[in-house]
Each structure stands twice: as C-alpha cells, then as structure tokens.
Image (cartoon, rainbow, N blue to C red):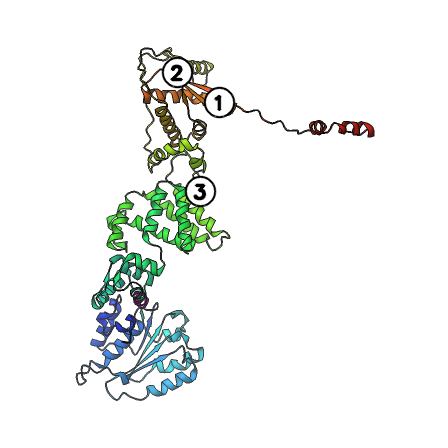
Amino acid sequence: MEHFIVSARKYRPQNFVDVVGQQAITNTLEKAIKNNHLAQALLFTGPRGVGKTSCARILAKNINQQDAEVAADEDFAFNIFELDAASNNSVDDIRSLTEQVRIPPQTGKYKVYIIDEVHMLSQAAFNAFLKTLEEPPAHAIFILATTEKHKIIPTILSRCQIFDFKRIGVLDAKNYLKVICEKENITAEDDALHIIAQKADGAMRDALSIFDRVVSFSGNNLTREAVTENLNVLDYDTYFNMTNLMLTNNIPQVLNAFNVVLAKGFEGHHFINGLASHFRDLLVAKDKATLELLEVGDTAKKKYLEQATKASIPFLMQAIKKANDCDLNYRASKNQRLLVELTIMQIASITFDGEKKKPANYIIPATFFQALSPAVKEIAKPILKKAVVTEKKVVEQPKPKLATPILKTAQRRPSSLSLKSIHEKKVVKKIDEEENFDNHPKDVFTEETLQKLWKEYVALLITKGERSMASIVGTDLPKLGKNFEISFTVPNKLMEDQFKKGRSKLINFLREKLNNFGIKISVILNETVEKKFAYTPQEKYNKMKEKNPLLEKLRQTFELDM
C-alpha cells in the first residue's frame, strides 16, 4: 500500500511564486535578497496556515543560492536550524542557541535560525536572547514566527523587521484548490471549492486538510451537496429559501424552516450570523460598483443577483440591523431559540403593509393566518399571497356607476361635524341599500360564485388593515335565496351591529363583481342562550338551595345569617 502524503505537505510551497495570497511580502523578500538589503532579524506574524514557516524556509534556502559558486540544487540543509519555542522555551535552550550562532557555516554565506512560535519563550529566555538578536554575527540571520505578536516583549519587536501575513482570500484559496484538482485528476464544482475555501477561514493549510477529507468522502468528483453534507455547513440555498419566505411574510413557514435547521444540529447563533451575511451579500449585489465584494461562486452569484431585485434596500437595512441585534444579545439570552424566532418573525413582518402604523418590533398577528374560517382560508390564501407585496399596489374596487345619482344636495356642502351632515349620511346609506335598480343589470349567479367572491372580499379587507370587519365577514359563508336575497348568520348582537355598518361596501363590491344590482343582504342573528352564573352571596345561596331544599330549613333552625 502506497504511503499517503497529505496535501498540506505534498503541495507545500518550494519557492516564493508558489506562496498563495502573500504577494506583497514575497516580492519584498525577493528584492531584499537580490539587493542584499535583508535585515538580520525578521519577525513573521499572522494567523495560522498562511505561509509564515514556508516563507521562512524558502528565504533561508534562497539567501545562500545567491552565491554563484554553489550548485543550483543545493538545499543548504546544514545551514538551516529550526527551533520550536513551544518546547524549547527555557533560558538554557537560548544559551545553547547563542553558542551555536558563533560557529560560521561550512558552505554558503549564512546560517539561518528559524524560531517558530516564538511567543512561547519565557520572560527570562527573551531577556537572554536580546543581546544576540541585537548584535548577531555577520553570518547569522534570525527568522522568528508567531501567531500572537502581542505576547512578544517590545524590546524584541524593536530589534526585528516585522512582516504581517494576512488571511488568504476565498478566491485565492479556491483558485489554488483548482490547481491541485487538475494535478490530482479530480473534478470539482466551483461552488464546492468555494465552500471549502470559506470553511478554511483564511488558512491555506486548513483548506488543504478539508480538501483531503472531502475527497476521502466523495472520491474524485466533488459536488456542492457532498461538501455541505460532509462539512455539516448550512448551504446557501437555506438562506435563499428563508429570504423568499420572509419577503412573502409567510411566518409559519419561516418558523418551520428554522426548525429544520435546528433539527440538523446547527446552533441558532450560527444560523443568524449566516442570515446576516446573506443579507449583506444581497445588499452588495444591488449595485454593480460593489459586486466585486461578493465572494461567492458563479452559480451563487446569479442567484444573489436574482434575489437582490426582489429585496428592497430598506428591507435589507432593517433585516441586517435586527439580525445584528440578535447576534449581540444571543449569549446573554436565557431562551436563545425564542430570541432567534422573534427576530426572524420581525424580519418577515418588515414588508407587511396590513397595518397603517407599525412599531419597530412589529410582528404580524397570528390572527392574520388563523382568524378566518377554514372554508374562507382555503381560497383566500392565494389571494393574500398576491395582495401582500413589498410596495403598496392594492387598488380599491371602483364603485358602480349608477344611472341616477344617489343623492342630490344643495350646492353648499355642510360641515362634516354638523348634525345636518350626520343626518344626510344616514339618508345616503339607507338609499344605497334600498334603492330600486329595476333598470340595471341583474345577471344570474350561483351560490358557489357568491361564496368565492365573499372570500375574496375578506382577503381585500385584510390587506386594507380592516381586520375587525374581516374576522366578522369570515365567520361564515353566505346563503343564496330567492330574488338574489343573500342571508348571512352572525353569532352575537355586537357582530350584527358591526356587520350592518360595513354592509353597504360589501353590497357594492358584490354588485359590481356579479353585475347584478338586485342583490340584498339580510343578517340573521343566531345568538345562543348563555348560562347565568351566580356572583353575589344571595345568588350563590339561591343556587345551593335549588340543589338541596333542606339547606333553607337548616338556616332557619339555627337562625343563621345568609
């Protein structure tokens, strides 16, 4: 069995050209070697897996290759000394090192000492190293590498030329993984490599380790689905689907989708952070000038551009703010799931225009999804989906044009607060409901058509914010009688009064839709007799006496007060 070599070792850079994402540093080091302008103490600092030790080894080899007398394939292994400061951090280790520094190299001009994880040295070891670092022999060069520069004492930092290594960009890491795929004869989707590069979080070594793991899982064909399954990461399709549900104000499905995310083992904190990043990417995709900031694959970029046209900038700004607030409060919350659920419900309510004035943390009431009767809800659902949009596009139904004016008044219009105006409004309402329309069309219609339009009117009331009237009209379905007489049943007197106030608008709506001006609506009150409860002591006693007549005899015998 052939020995397997991990990609991080197999494809470790052997020259400055192979180093990924650190062009500024590698160019500086190459020119410093060429111009003989290299400092004798260098400090390489930066995150893990970005090429610090690799650059130190390449630099150590290239320093001596400038001599024309040496062979081109000479690696000068005897001139390079690597010290792990994590395990050699005492004063004695540094003293041993300073004694070796005095000995000149046997071949080449320089001896290079690479001290990795230098921040692990003790305080005494740092102090013992100061003098040698400040005035080393002409043939000695020190390269210090660390991930935590702040732990190094200032006197050491002042004696070194510092090179700050940056995190490797997602695109740079993805492109390098493509090169490796070509060498290893592996076919990989662009989105699959992009997810690996994102998961590595700027570390090339981590990207190569993840790459090896995914290849072991899925073989020589890397797909986006296989990568997301193996790495257990939230696919961007999850966020696209969630955003579409939020834009249509579908809170029940939003909560169900979030529950699916939790069922897969993801934390709510991870989800809300990813959602905020998704909204940020949508905001970036709104403008061509910022499109370069969108670090995603080509397939994902098309989806972002498509969804960015649906999401308005005010929605995205509010959504990002709410997601960010949830992120800040997540650790301190005792009910973290509820916090995330409240946040996503608030985001899903941003574009809802059913209320005239909404508070900052407004959530669509549950009655919007549940108040209607099952029969009304079944047909009203697709109507509501079309009616609730990001911008107000609900056009009110025009009133039917009557052949004769309903009411002709004097040219002078009375004040809206005068008694005369109130009286005239009542007259208008009465004539509107009872006027004879013998000369107007009276098309025949079925009860099924009537009920369908009835449900449509309920949906229209909801979109206008008239929830009280919508709940009353949606309590039951109408019945069609003779001569286009419509009967509607209500359960109590209060609902009957409220229905009569809005009945004229409903009649006008049905007359126009059905092209029948002979329609009339009668209200039937079906109020059940309520059970009377005893509240006062006298009423309670009377109730008990009805159940047991001997109770009264007991009271009289002992002359008890009631």
**Magenta extent:** 204-212
CA neighbours of label 3 inside 10 A, class few (<14), some (14 to 19), many (20+): few
Q: As displayed, is residue 354 above or below residue 39?
A: above
* Residue 208 visible here: yes
* Inter-mark Cα distance, 2 to 1: 22 Å
* Inter-mark Cα distance, 2 to 3: 50 Å
Residue 14, given in percent of the width and then of the height, sits at 24, 74
Query: Front-most of 360 and 373?
Result: 373
Residue 50, given in percent of the width and then of the height, sits at 31, 68
Quarter of the image where the N terminus is located: bottom left
Which quarter of the figure has residue 378? top left
User: Predominant secondary structure in magenta?
Assistant: helix
Query: Front-most of 186 and 174?
Result: 186
Which label sits in the foreground, 2 or 3? 2
Task: Please give the residue where the numbered disc 1 appears in the rendered image.
Answer: 496
| SS at badge 1 | helix
Task: Please give the residue where the numbered disc 3 appears in the rendered image.
Answer: 361
Q: As displayed, is residue 76 above or below residue 353?
A: below
Q: Residue at x 32, y 32 (%)?
A: 393
Which label sits in the foreground, 2 or 1? 2
* Inter-mark Cα distance, 3 to 1: 34 Å
- Sequence order check, earlier mark of 2 and 1: 2
Amino acid bearing label 2: Lys
Q: Which mark is residue 482?
A: 2
Query: Front-most of 308 and 135?
Result: 308
* Residue 201 visible here: no
The residue lying furthest to the left in this view is 68
Amino acid bearing label 3: Asn
Amino acid bearing label 1: Glu
Residue 375, given in percent of the width and then of the height, sits at 41, 31
| SS at badge 2 | helix
